[in-house]
Image: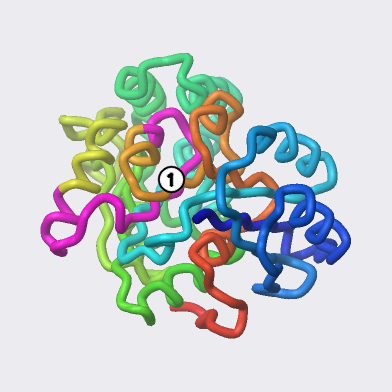
Amino acid sequence: MFIVTLLTNPATPMLERPIIEALRNAWGGGDADWLNPGIAAEFPLAQMPDNHWQVWEDLQGQGIDLAIQPAEGRRKRMLLADMDSTMIGQECIDELADEAGVGAYVADITARAMNGELEFEEALRERVALLKGLNASVIRKVLDERISFTPGGHELIATMKAHGGYAVLVSGGFTAFTAHVAKSLGFDEHRANTLHIANDQLCGTVAEPILGRAAKVQALEEISARLGITALEVIAVGDGANDLGMLGRAGAGVALHAKPSVAAQCDLRINHGDLSALLYLQGYRADEFRGGA
């Protein structure tokens, strides 16, 4: 048995019953159920339809996300989340680089690395080197003035934790940022890279080994084993090429507003919804949501 979930941007509720009913009838699904009127609905389906991705593409043009997944085991016990452009709306290294006057150059490298065009570790070393000499106080400035949380993040973590879940922030970025984001959103733990700082200045280097794609998979395996759960009980979310390992390993790997080359390798793709989509994918209703950290 499968569950079909239809979602749209909570800021612009436009999911209408005729759209749901037409799809349910075309696929021979069961009764539709609203998880949040105008925003999210689902219905059961006996088998995966042959035209899944064709319909997905058609609905994308209407501002609607479509996801189909096995009904069994949808509610997960652990969240493993990327930080940059996932839990927050920015890439922290790009914001630091902008303060250093090399923002456009670094942003281009970041985009290429996240799209899988460059090897992540080497691209990170190159970008960090350009920050050499920057006063360490700029980290606090970026946190205060440039970082914004992705909508739905507080609700996602608070709701999963209220139902016994465990939340982990794992980033190819820096601990100076993950510590703040993890505390603000209510994550149980965080892992990231460490920027070298001396005499209140960035040294232009990062501690080795660099936390990249393999380290995110390692975090999934180590932490799930410690919790006594399997990878199937994990929902992971990310947007870049260095997230593909954990997205493929987790029971549910969600590409959230991801780079096209990344989304193409994931079965669960959210391009219109926010982080609350991860709750709807697990079958949570809006009245089950908790308010935040």
**Residue at (43% x, 56% y) in the render:** 140
Task: Note whether residue 138 is visible.
Answer: no
**Residue at (32% x, 18% y) in the render:** 122
- Residue 118 vs residue 43, the one in the foreground: 43
- Residue 7 vs residue 137, the one in the foreground: 7
Q: Quadrant of the C terminus?
A: bottom left
- 105 with respect to 236 (left or right): right
- 39 with respect to 163 (left or right): right
Region of the chain picked out in magenta, as a range: 222-244
235 part of magenta stretch = yes
Considering only vertical position in the picture, is 268 above or below 208? below
Colour mapping: rainbow
Picture mark count = 1
211 part of magenta stretch = no
**Residue at (36% x, 23% y) in the render:** 120
Considering only vertical position in the picture, is 212 above or below 227? above
Give the residue number, with chain letter if any, for mark 1.
Answer: 253
SS class, disc 1: strand
- 161 with respect to 274 (left or right): left
